[in-house]
Image (spheres, grey):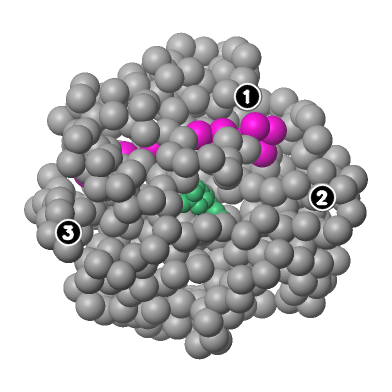
């Protein structure tokens, strides 16, 4: 099939991505006990690269082993895992594909089972149905902010040394960078809080630190929320201003998503959730905009590329069920992926665990891909929950969303 989905895209840094399809970051929960990449994790990226994807974003890699987002995270703080990181990058580069490391700090979205006292821009606790799983955060000191900026830069530097072909700052979904951007989470009165310029300072310092360390010809991207979908929080207008600033500073690409643990809009069930906003922003900036969330139909992917200024289409869950989805699109054998509806068989329990069972289902399937097995399409929510407890112990049953 010859359509614009298979046209290459050249970024400001001079790097060319072979097509317009990328695998969105999915935390694989497959790190070793030493918090490094496992053999199975590397194997999954081999499968995605062979499946024809232009670019794979890794699941979020943490910058600080004291503050993890969930069990099974990979942490890159120094070069202790360099050999395995090199093999991970190699697998992701097979077949002319790109592999970028997504770099993250959870801030207050670090569950109780992981962190006794999480840190955040301000001491504002998570509310709503997810609240019980998290201890209230403590406000970061100015020194901790500077140290954390440096940690993002260090992780990115090691990613480049290991052979990853780019990096992405996770600035979406209510994690630390997104907490700094949001006036609801960030109540600081110093230079990191207050005006939007101050709230984006943390992100800007991370980006500038990375650019200086990595050079002009290395792709640096950002995943950002269109909005947090909450009152008095990060709005579309503010999101657009941040994106414009990043374009001005020379960023290569920005990926649009939305929501956080309180409002998990990034995991909605409908078709194509953030395209309207992505389309609008892409007309306003001279920088490629990528969009993720809900792409299932071939027509929606082709239309988004051919009829709007959006430059790349992200796929997450469909690529777990069909790792060779891009090849199928290319050779005309693609059939729409229908995601299974998971149920425990108990209505009240389904409501209580909500998207959580869904997440663990995808983790279970990613782990099967890593073992060289085909994904399993089932609708029984108990199976992924057992898988989770078996892999990481009962502590893993705490709420999370990415
Ligand atoms: C198992 C799982 C893990 C995820 N982990 C991350 C992550 O580490 N970082 C991130 O930015 N988004 C993460 N996401 C969100 C996806 O990147 C994507 O935004 C979302 O699934 C919507 O895309 P889709 O409809 O194609 O699945 C995760 C999603 C799933 C299903």
Mark 1 and mark 2 lie on one chain; the one further toward the N terminus is 1
Q: Residue at x 89, y 54 (%)?
A: 346
Q: What's the magenta region? A: 251-263
> Marks 1 and 3: which is nearer the front?
3
Q: Residue at x 77, y 29 (%)?
A: 127
Q: Is residue 167 left or right of residue 109?
A: left
Whole-number angstrom distance, CA of label 1 to CA of label 3: 40 Å
**Which of the pair 28/307 is nearer the observer?**
307
Give the left or right position of residue 90, taking residue 139 as reference: left
Residue 187 falls in image quadrant: top right
Q: Which residue is mark 3?
A: 6
Q: Determine contact: label 1, label 2, CB under 8 Å.
A: no
On whether ligand 1 comes within 8 Å of the CB at mark 3, the answer is no
Q: Is residue 224 visible?
A: no
- Secondary-structure class at tag 3: helix
| Element marked by disc 1 | loop
Q: Nearer the viewer, mark 1 or mark 2?
A: 2
The relative height of residue 156 versus residue 164 in the rendered view (above or below) is above
Do the residues under discs 1 and 3 have CB atoms within 8 angstroms?
no
Return the mark for residue 350. Answer: 2
Magenta region's main secondary structure? Answer: loop
Nearest the camera: 153 or 401? 401
Residue in the image at 90% along x and 45% along y:
348
Q: Is residue 277 visible?
A: yes
For disc 1, the marked residue is 185
């Amino acid at each position: 099939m010859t359509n614009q989905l298979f046209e290459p895209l050249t970024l400001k840094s001079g790097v060319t991505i072979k097509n317009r399809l990328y695998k969105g970051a999915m935390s694989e929960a497959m790190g070793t006990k030493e918090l490094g990449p496992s053999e199975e994790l590397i194997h999954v990226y081999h499968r995605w690269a062979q499946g024809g994807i232009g670019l794979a974003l890794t699941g979020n890699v943490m910058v600080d082993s004291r503050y993890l987002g969930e069990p099974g995270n990979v942490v890159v703080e120094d070069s202790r895992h360099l050999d395995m990181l090199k093999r991970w990058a190699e697998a992701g580069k097979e077949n002319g594909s790109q592999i970028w490391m997504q770099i993250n700090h959870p801030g207050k979205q670090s569950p109780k089972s992981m962190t006794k006292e999480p840190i955040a821009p301000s001491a504002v606790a998570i509310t709503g149905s997810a609240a019980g799983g998290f201890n209230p955060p403590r406000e970061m000191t100015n020194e901790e902010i500077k140290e954390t900026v440096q940690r993002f830069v260090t992780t990115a530097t090691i990613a480049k040394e290991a052979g990853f072909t780019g990096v992405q700052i996770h600035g979406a979904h209510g994690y630390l960078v997104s907490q700094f951007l949001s006036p609801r989470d960030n109540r600081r009165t110093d230079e990191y809080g207050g005006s939007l310029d101050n709230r984006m300072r943390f992100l800007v310092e991370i980006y500038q630190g990375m650019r200086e360390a990595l050079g002009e010809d290395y792709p640096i991207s950002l995943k950002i929320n269109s909005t947090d979908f909450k009152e008095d929080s990060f709005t579309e207008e503010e999101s657009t201003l941040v994106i414009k600033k990043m374009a001005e500073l020379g960023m290569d690409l920005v990926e649009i998503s939305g929501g956080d643990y309180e409002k998990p809009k990034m995991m909605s069930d409908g078709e194509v959730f953030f395209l309207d906003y992505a389309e609008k922003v892409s007309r306003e900036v001279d920088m490629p905009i990528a969009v993720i969330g809900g792409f299932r139909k071939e027509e929606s992917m082709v239309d988004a590329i051919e009829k709007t200024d959006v430059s790349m289409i992200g796929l997450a869950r469909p690529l777990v069920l069909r790792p060779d989805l891009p090849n199928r699109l290319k050779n005309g054998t693609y059939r729409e992926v229908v995601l299974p509806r998971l149920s425990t068989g108990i209505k009240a329990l389904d409501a209580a665990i909500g998207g959580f069972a869904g997440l663990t289902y995808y983790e279970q399937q990613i782990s099967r891909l890593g073992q060289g097995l085909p994904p399993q399409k089932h609708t029984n929510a108990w199976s992924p929950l057992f898988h989770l407890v078996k892999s990481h112990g009962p502590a893993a049953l705490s709420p999370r969303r990415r």
